[in-house]
Image (cartoon, grey):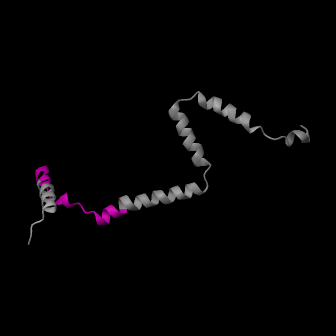
Amino acid sequence: MSIKALFLPINYFSLFRLKWNIMRKRNVFVRIYYFYLEGFRSMTLGKTLWAIILIKLFVLFIILKIFFFPNFLKKYETKEEKQEYVGNELINRAMPQNK
C-alpha cells in the first residue's frame, strides 16, 4: 500500500448511496426506527437534554401525583358510592350553595 493511498479522500457520496440502497429495501417502520436511532446516536447535547426532559416528566407525573392529588374515592367501597360522590361533587361545584 502506498502512502498516496492512505491520504485519498473518502468518497462519502458513494458510501451514502450504498447505505441508501440497503435501507430502501427494508420495511418503512424499520427505516423510521433506524432514522431515529442514528439521530439519537449522533447527539451529544441532545442526550443530556432528553435526560432532563425525562426526569422532569417523572417528577411531574409521579412525585406530584403522590403529594398533591390524593385519591378521594379510596374511602368508598362500591362503584355506586363512587358514582354518587362524583356526581354530587360536580353538581356542588357547578352550583355552589349560598351560606
**How many numbered marks, from 0 up?**
0
Q: Residue 87 occupies which quadrant of the picture?
A: bottom left
State whether residue 99 is above or below residue 62.
below
Q: Residue at x 32, y 61 (%)?
A: 65
Q: Residue 22 occupies which quadrant of the picture?
A: top right
Residue 96 appears at what percent x and percent y? 12, 65
Image quadrant holding the C terminus, namely bottom left
Q: Is residue 82 magenta?
A: yes
Image quadrant holding the N terminus, namely top right
Q: Is residue 12 magenta?
A: no
Residue 43 appears at what percent x and percent y? 60, 52
Q: Is residue 54 left or right of residue 96?
A: right
> In the image as oriented, which residue stretches furthest toward the top?
25
Q: Nearer the viewer, residue 10 or 63?
A: 10
Q: Is residue 75 left or right of residue 46?
A: left
Residue range (magenta): 63-83
State whether residue 60 is above or below residue 30.
below
State whether residue 97 is above or below residue 16.
below
Q: Residue at x 55, y 35 (%)?
A: 31
